[in-house]
Image (tube, helix red, strand yellow):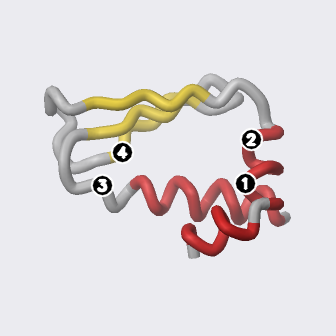
Amino acid sequence: MHTYLAKVRFLNTLSLIQSGNVTVIDENNEETIFGSEKDSQLKSKLIINDSYFWIRIASSREMVGHLI
């Protein structure tokens, strides 16, 4: 459950991006684009290769605190 909440909070935080966009490709190879400027030249890509990423975020007090 903690990993699910960490994932939801992390992705919700990305939805606040105002300039450019971030493409997230998760461990299930699902692609989601965050940001208000879908065609912006300011782009980033985050590739998550394994589900342990969410476990590490969930166990990191500093990161989870920033995501709340």
Label 2 sits on a secondary structure element that is helix
Measured in 3D between alpha carbons, the distance from the residue under mark 4 to the one under mark 3, in whole angstroms, is 7 Å
Where is 21 relative to 49, above or below?
below
Instruction: Name the residue nearer the viewer: 35 or 67.
Output: 67
Q: Disc 3 designates what residue?
A: 17
Q: Give the side of residue 23 with respect to residue 46, left or right.
A: left
Q: What is the quadrant of residue 4 in the picture?
A: bottom right
Q: Position of residue 42 (x, y in %)?
A: 20, 32
Dot 4 or dot 2: first in sequence order is 4
| Three-letter code for the amino acid on which mark 3 is drawn | Ile
Mark 2 or mark 3, which has the lower sequence index? Answer: 3
Which comes before the other along the chain, label 1 or label 4?
4
**x and y percent of residue 21 in the render?**
28, 39
Whether residue 51 sits left or right of residue 5 in the image: it is right
- As measured in the structure, the alpha-carbon distance from the residue carrying label 2 to the one carrying label 1 is 6 Å
Q: Which mark is residue 53?
A: 2
Q: Nearer the viewer, mark 1 or mark 4?
A: 1
Quadrant of the image occupied by residue 32: top left
Rendered residue at 67%/67% (across/down): 62
2 and 1 marks in contact (CB < 8 Å): yes
For mark 4, give the secondary structure.
Answer: strand
State how far apart marks 1 and 3 are (Cα).
20 Å
Q: How many neighbours does mark 4 have within 10 angstroms: few (below 14), some (14-19), or many (20 or more)?
A: many
Q: Amino acid at mark 2?
A: Phe
The CA span between labels 2 and 3 is 21 Å
Q: Which residue is mark 1?
A: 57
Tag 4 residue: 34
Instruction: Name the residue: 56% across, 68% down.
Output: 67
Tell whether label 3 touches label 4 (CB within 8 Å): yes
Q: Residue at x 74, y 41 (%)?
A: 53
Task: Confirm or deny contact between disc 1 and disc 3 (CB under 8 A).
Answer: no
Contact, mark 4 vs mark 2 (Cβ under 8 Å): no
